[in-house]
Image: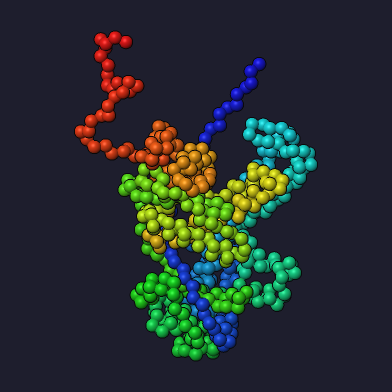
């Protein structure tokens, strides 16, 4: 009896490429070099406002998931105005609402991840140990199966808690951070003393945020920065007005603020008295204080991928990997231009160090795009949300599987996308996101060897994936047009690898002379003998 042929695997439908919108706002930072008196006043004001803001957040969580008109914000704001000011109260109620809505969205995301994990484990539990049912593989032995059953029960209990919180509309919020709160119970592992932890905890719970207001002096009445001399003044809460050293209950800091980064944009807004939000942020780890300025930006819709392709502009395709960024420049027809590029990317160390290295790598990409005259960049629309939820079941087991899952979890897909979006917008470039399905498989199959033949540099499978990403962003098929790449090296020098556009041919030229082996062109005479 012949071997039964397996059913051919069906490919999933691909999402259309789209242009990532430009950032809707900006945020810049400057350091405040405070003296002892200024630091004491800011600490007192932040503790006073922080305590009332946490009380307002508690009241908002108690109301649950209600409509906007039922949040009782006006009544809560009147209550806070008596102990601060109307503008401080508006910022506190707005922060409470934003924090509540963010926590509710996190609950929905956690529920979706838990459901995916439970479903993946359930499918594998339905298959006997050591066997396979379709594409689902059972567990190796009874011991692993038993451990997975316990794991499923734990996930189900967590899901029940999340479902209960969603139904009640009361998420668990830790002002100051859940991670920092957990370090209180393991100070030795965190290499902190109780006093150091207390300083960080108190600094994280301060509230010194003032929303901007168009028409107010320099865009913000609560915290005002004079663009001429850089002086910083703020309105003190009502119980702390006796500490004021400026008219109308204001306190003037001894230091100044200048905002060197994007200073011209900030000056344009404050000079026109447009709204600018300010946040005074303490950093207890480094014993520093910072002043953040943020505002919303008017953005225009970016061009669609079809418009970029019709204009015939170049694009820089980028593939994000664990230790490097692979990039290739493509013309409007999807042909590679020049040799592939490799930008090193090291993602080890503290969070600030990793973020700095990521920005350095993105700066290198933008430099390549500018030098090659590209109109934008093409990246994969990666998320890894499903992989993080079901990684133990679908990404291997043992030491090798654990290392692979750790590598995938360490790739900063969301941060890379947000950093690239902002930095590319300032450089005048657009960012196109494409579906990441089969890019590595098809790119390595159809493009790795032709790129290696065309260039003298080392071409990896990631560079082949870059070609698939770029061609998909331009609307072309990933597979090269058959018969384009010449098998002979001398002939291949006349045409680019994977040529998509037709070669121009002058009109009126004569055809090359026919030889014995050249087949005749045109229709043959029916009366001619065959």
Can residue 510 be seen in the rendering of this structure?
yes
Q: Quadrant of residue 495?
A: top left
Q: Which of the pair 346/375 is nearer the observer?
A: 346
In the picture, the quarter occupied by the C terminus is: top left
Residue under the image location 59 percent in, 81 percent down: 43
From the top left corner, tell me how far across and down residue 26 is, in percent: 44, 66
Residue under the image location 31 percent in, 48 percent down: 311
Q: Which of the pair 431/399 is nearer the observer?
A: 399
- 422 is higher (above) or lower (below) than 29: above
Can residue 60 be seen in the rendering of this structure?
no
379 sits left or right of 104 in the view: left
Residue under the image location 36 percent in, 73 percent down: 268
Q: Quadrant of residue 476?
A: top left
- 418 is higher (above) or lower (below) than 117: below
468 sits left or right of 186 in the view: left
Q: Quadrant of residue 34?
A: bottom right
- 454 is higher (above) or lower (below) than 71: above
From the top left corner, tell me how far across and down residue 512 is, in percent: 27, 29
From the top left corner, tell me how far across and down residue 441 is, in percent: 53, 40
From the top left corner, tell me how far across and down residue 497 is, in percent: 41, 40
Residue under the image location 44 percent in, 43 percent down: 454
Q: Which of the pair 317/21 is nearer the observer?
A: 317
């Amino acid at each position: 009896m012949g071997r039964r042929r397996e059913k051919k695997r069906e490919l999933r439908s691909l999402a259309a490429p789209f242009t990532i919108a430009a950032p809707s706002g900006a945020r810049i930072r400057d350091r405040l070099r405070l003296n002892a008196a200024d630091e004491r006043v800011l600490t007192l004001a932040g503790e006073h406002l922080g305590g009332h803001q946490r009380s307002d957040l508690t009241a908002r969580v108690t109301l649950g998931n209600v409509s906007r008109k039922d949040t009782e914000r006006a009544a809560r704001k009147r209550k806070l105005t008596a102990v601060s000011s109307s503008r401080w109260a508006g910022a506190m109620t707005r922060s409470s609402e934003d924090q509540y809505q963010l926590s509710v969205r996190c609950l929905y995301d956690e529920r979706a991840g838990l459901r995916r994990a439970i479903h993946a484990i359930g499918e594998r539990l339905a298959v006997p140990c050591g066997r396979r049912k379709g594409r689902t593989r059972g567990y190796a032995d009874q011991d692993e199966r038993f451990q997975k059953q316990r794991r499923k029960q734990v996930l189900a209990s967590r899901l029940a808690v999340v479902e209960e919180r969603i139904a009640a509309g009361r998420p668990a919020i830790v002002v100051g951070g859940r991670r920092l709160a957990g370090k209180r119970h393991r100070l030795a592992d965190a290499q902190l003393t109780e006093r150091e932890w207390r300083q960080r905890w108190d600094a994280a719970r301060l509230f010194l945020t003032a929303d901007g207001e168009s028409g107010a002096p320099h865009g913000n009445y609560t915290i005002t920065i004079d663009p001429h001399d850089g002086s910083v003044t703020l309105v003190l809460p009502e119980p702390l007005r006796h500490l004021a050293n400026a008219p109308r209950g204001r306190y003037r800091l001894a230091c100044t603020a200048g905002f060197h980064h994007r200073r011209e944009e900030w000056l344009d807004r404050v000079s026109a008295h447009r709204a600018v939000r300010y946040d005074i942020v303490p950093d207890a780890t480094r014993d520093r204080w910072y002043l953040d300025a943020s505002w919303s930006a008017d953005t225009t819709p970016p061009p669609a991928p079809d418009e970029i392709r019709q204009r015939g502009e170049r694009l820089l395709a980028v593939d994000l990997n664990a230790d490097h960024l692979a990039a290739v420049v493509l013309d409007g027809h999807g042909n590679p231009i020049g040799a592939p590029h490799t930008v090193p990317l090291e993602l080890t160390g503290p969070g600030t160090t990793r973020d700095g290295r990521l920005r350095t790598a993105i700066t290198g990409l933008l430099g390549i795009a500018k030098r090659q005259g590209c109109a934008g960049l093409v990246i994969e629309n990666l998320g890894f949300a499903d992989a993080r939820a079901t990684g133990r079941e679908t990404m291997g087991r043992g030491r090798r599987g654990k290392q692979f899952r750790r590598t995938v979890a360490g790739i900063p897909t969301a941060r890379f996308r947000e950093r690239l979006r902002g930095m590319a917008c300032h450089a005048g470039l657009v960012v196109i996101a494409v579906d990441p399905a089969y890019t590595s498989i098809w790119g390595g199959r159809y493009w790795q060897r032709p790129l290696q033949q065309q260039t003298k540099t080392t071409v990896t499978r990631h560079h082949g994936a870059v070609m698939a990403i770029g061609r998909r962003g331009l609307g072309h098929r990933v597979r090269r047009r058959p018969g384009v790449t010449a098998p002979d090296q001398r002939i291949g020098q006349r045409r680019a690898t994977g040529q998509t556009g037709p070669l121009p041919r002058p009109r009126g030229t004569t055809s090359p002379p026919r030889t014995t082996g050249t087949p005749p062109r045109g229709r043959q005479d029916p009366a001619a003998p065959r």
